[in-house]
C-alpha cells in the first residue's frame, strides 16, 4: 500500500516476499536445493492430509461422546421406571399380606373372598415383577452401551491428539528442516492412524 511516496508492507506481503526470495535462492543454488523443496512439499501435503483425517476423527469423537450421554440418560430413565415398578410390587405385596391375614382371621364363609384377593395380588405381583426385571435389564444394557461409546470416544480423542502432535512436528520440521523431525511426524501420525483404526473396530 502506497501513501505519500512510502510503501507500507502488510504481514502477507512479507510472507510472499520471503517465499519469493527463497524461491530465487533455490534457483541460484542450482539442483542442490531441489531436494529440500520436494521435502517441504511432501510435508505440506502430509499436513493437509493429516489435518483432514484429524477433523474426521474429532467429529467421530464428539459424536460418540454425545451418544454416550444419550444412552446414559436412557439408562437413568429405565432405572427410574424399574424403581417405580418395584415400589408398585411392594405395594401389592403389602396388600396381599393384609388379605392373607384377613383370610386367616375371617369366618369360613368369608375366607373364599379373601383367598380370591390373595390370588389376584399374587398374579399382579408376578406381572409387575416381570416388567420391573425387564426395565432393569434395559437399564443395564443402556449402561453397557454408554460405556462402550465412551471407550470409543477416548480412542478417537487419543487418535486426534496424536495427529495434532504430528501436525505440530510437521510445522517445526518445515522451519528447522530437521530430518529426524520428519521421521517423528510420520511415526506419530502412524500411531494416530492405528488408534483411529482401533476406535473404528470398537477395540
Image (cartoon, helix red, strand yellow):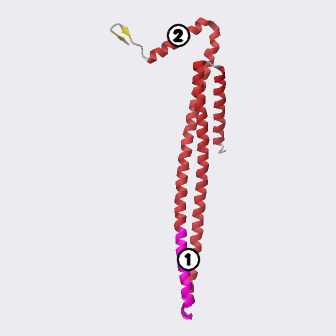
Residue lying furthest left: 4
Q: Is residue 49 visible?
A: no
Q: Quadrant of the C terminus?
A: top right
What residue appears at the point 61 percent right and 37 percent down from the top-left corner?
159
In terms of secondary structure, where does tag 1 sit?
helix
Q: Main secondary structure of the magenta part?
A: helix
Give the answer, above or below, for where 59 lies relative to 141: above
Highlighted magenta segment, given as a residue range: 85-113
What residue appears at the point 57 percent right and 89 percent down from the top-left corner?
104
The CA distance from mark 2 to mark 1 is 90 Å
Give the answer, above or below, for where 23 lies relative to 52: above
Percent from the top left, x then y, of residue 15? 49, 16
Rendering quarter of residue 28: top right
Badge 2 or badge 1: first in the primary sequence: 2
Q: Nearer the viewer, residue 151 or 134?
A: 151
In terms of secondary structure, where does tag 2 sit?
helix
Residue of label 1:
93
Percent from the top left, x then y, of residue 97? 56, 81
Percent from the top left, x then y, of residue 43? 61, 22
What residue appears at the point 59 percent right and 7 percent down from the top-left corner?
27
Residue of label 2:
21
Q: Inspect the magenta stretch and tell me whether residue 95 lies in it.
A: yes
Give the answer, above or below, for where 131 lies relative to 160: below
Total of numbered circles in the picture?
A: 2
Rendering quarter of residue 90: bottom right
Rendering quarter of residue 115: bottom right
What residue appears at the point 62 percent right and 41 percent down from the top-left corner?
155
Q: Quadrant of the N terminus?
A: top left
Give the answer, above or below, for where 72 lies relative to 157: below
Q: Say if mark 2 contacts mark 1, CB within 8 Å.
A: no
Q: Which mark is residue 146?
A: none
Percent from the top left, x then y, of residue 166? 61, 29
Amino acid at each position: 500500500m502506497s501513501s505519500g511516496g512510502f510503501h507500507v508492507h502488510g504481514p502477507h506481503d512479507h510472507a510472499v516476499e520471503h517465499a519469493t526470495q527463497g524461491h530465487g535462492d533455490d534457483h541460484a543454488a542450482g539442483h542442490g536445493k531441489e531436494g529440500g523443496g520436494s521435502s517441504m512439499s511432501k510435508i505440506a501435503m502430509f499436513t493437509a492430509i493429516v489435518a483432514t483425517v484429524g477433523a474426521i476423527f474429532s467429529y467421530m469423537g464428539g459424536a460418540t461422546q454425545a451418544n454416550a450421554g444419550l444412552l446414559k440418560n436412557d439408562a437413568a430413565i429405565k432405572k427410574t421406571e424399574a424403581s417405580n415398578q418395584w415400589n408398585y410390587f411392594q405395594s401389592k405385596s403389602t396388600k396381599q399380606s393384609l388379605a392373607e391375614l384377613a383370610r386367616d382371621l375371617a369366618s369360613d364363609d368369608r375366607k373364599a373372598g379373601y383367598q380370591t384377593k390373595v390370588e389376584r395380588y399374587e398374579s399382579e405381583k408376578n406381572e409387575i415383577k416381570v416388567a420391573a426385571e425387564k426395565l432393569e435389564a434395559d437399564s443395564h444394557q443402556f449402561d453397557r452401551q454408554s460405556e462402550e461409546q465412551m471407550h470409543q470416544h477416548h480412542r478417537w480423542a487419543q487418535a486426534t491428539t496424536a495427529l495434532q502432535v504430528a501436525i505440530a512436528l510437521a510445522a517445526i520440521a518445515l522451519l528447522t528442516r530437521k530430518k529426524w523431525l520428519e521421521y517423528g511426524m510420520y511415526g506419530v501420525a502412524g500411531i494416530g492412524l492405528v488408534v483411529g483404526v482401533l476406535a473404528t473396530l470398537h477395540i
